[in-house]
Image: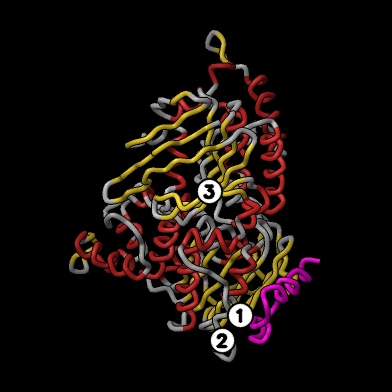
Amino acid sequence: MLEVSGVSKSFPGVKALQDISVPFKDGEIHALLGENGAGKSTLMKIICGIYKADTGKVVLDGKELKLHGYGDAVKQHISMVHQEIQLIPEGSIAENIINDKISQFTKFGFVNWKAINQFALKYMKEVGLDFPPEKKVRFLSAAHKQLIQIAKALSADARVLLLDEPTSSLTRHEANTLFELVRKLKDKGMIIIFVSHKLEEVQVIADRVTVFRDGRLVGTDSIGNMENSKIIKMMIGRDFVYRYRGRLDAYNGEVALEARNITSRIHGFKDMSFKVHKGEILGFYGLVGSGRTELVRTMLNIDKRDGGEVLLWGKPVKIDSFKTALHKYKIGYVTENRKEEGLFLEHTVAMNVCVNSWNKSYYRHIPFINLKKEKENADVFAKRLEIKTPSLNTLAGKLSGGNQQKISIAKWLAADCDILIIDEPTVGVDIGAKEYIHELIWNLAAKEGKTVILISSDMNEMISLARRILIFRDRQITGELSGEEFFAKSGEEISTEIGKSFV
């Protein structure tokens, strides 16, 4: 058994954990739940030696662990798979799997690459990675990178496995493959600690659930006694339901953006077209890899466009780069990959909020940043989006996932974009922050007249916000759902209709 007892941890201005005691049993999948900043990831990092607790202890099989870093945890057969991708892009899959144990494959200064590749293949097969072990990581998707991290953890002969949002970048099929693997590890007696904001996943995979709120332990119980409504109330202190928000008066309005016959050899699609009106929330719904994100990135020439044209307010425009889309045409894109593409994690909150609108912080119109003005501009949007941070000088990477996502949205609002494309806005975000982000997106269209393209694989999110949905499958648009009367139906009825588009 693994047990944390009386654990507390504080950071400047924040009490992250307060007197936490939780037992984790062999052969059990134990889910940790709570809003962003509730203390889940902090506890996991204490268990694996990344953080040192201010008070309390971690005990494994009756022996207190004295860990001075993650390397000590690995020696105790404790491994963690982080939500953030932590791989070497220029390294191969095999090199990333064995990079903390390469000495095992070295003799007299020579590396046995054949043995390394054979070793890596064993764990690649376990997680369903069907690539040559020599393939470079930088050519792979975020989903595949996440599976490499899991393979690396398994290769360390872990007895305790900590999974922090392991499915945030995975398709449904890949997530199911992971769950099958996790169940096999559980049957072998492994202790598995699982963090996820997807409650439907928790109901499927977990045996026991512990809920945190504001760094405190709210309760622990078996999954059979923890319905979603009960879990949500424990997490945020109140009931939460997806709701019909009403009409968006956009259908008779002006067409803000139109894409005609967009073609991409890289992504394998051609002649994809759509249009979106001023003040509309247009949904792109489908699984990861279905073509939703690829269409947007090709349209904006982030990825090379091989054909088609883009019209803005009825007139053809030439978008040759993402910079042009932003500064000339006021089109913003909130990427799904906030860690690698959306934020500068090693820079301040203020810098990240203002990075797309630095001209507002110039010193007397001279292109030198007035730091005082930058902070004032950032403060406006930090307050508007209720970003929880000790200060605007705090590094963005130090904040919770929910607050990082708010920053990722804030920088586009600060740039005063007229058209905003938001890709998976609440992946890795807790239910409370999710509700806030949903309200923010709705108000952008309903109250400010912004045009929003919402890309999401969360059906409830799509139903709650979009008033027209394009269904994507196999890099094609396979259907369209629209009409206010349709969206006023029950979630179950809408889900049935959406499901028909995948048949």
Crowding at dot 2, Cα within 10 Å, few <14 / some 14-19 / many 20+, comes out as some
How crowded pointer 3 is (Cα within 10 Å; few <14, some 14-19, many 20+) is rated as some
- Is residue 66 at least partly visible in the picture? yes
Residue at 62% from the left image edge and 41% from the top image edge:
29
Magenta stretch: give its range: 480-503
In space, the residues marked 1 and 2 are separated at their CA atoms by 8 Å
Above or below residue 59? Residue 205 is below
Whichever of labels 1 and 3 marks the residue nearer the N terminus, that label is: 3
Name which of mark 1 and mark 2 comes first in the sequence.
2
Q: Amino acid at mark 3?
A: Thr
**Residue at 70% from the left image edge and 70% from the top image edge:** 471
Q: Which mark is residue 181?
A: none
- Which x, y percent locates residue 45? 44, 38
Q: Check disc 2 and give the amino acid type.
A: Arg
The foreground one among 233 and 257 is 233
Which residue in the structure is indicated by mark 1?
467
Q: Is residue 117 magenta?
A: no
The correct choice, above or below, for 18 with respect to 153 in the image is below
Q: Residue at x 72, y 34 (%)?
A: 125
Q: Secondary structure at mark 3?
A: strand
> Could you say which quadrant of the image residue 470 lies in?
bottom right
- Across and down, in percent, residue 147 comes to 62, 41
Taking the view exactly as shown, the residue that stands out farthest to the bottom is: 252
User: Dot 2 corresponds to which residue?
Assistant: 247
Residue under circle 3? 220
Distance, label 1 to label 3, CA atoms, is 39 Å
Disc 1 + disc 2, Cβ < 8 Å: yes
Q: CA distance from mark 2 to mark 3?
A: 41 Å
User: Going from the N terminus, do you reach mark 2 or mark 3 first?
Assistant: 3
Amino acid carrying mark 1 in the image: Arg
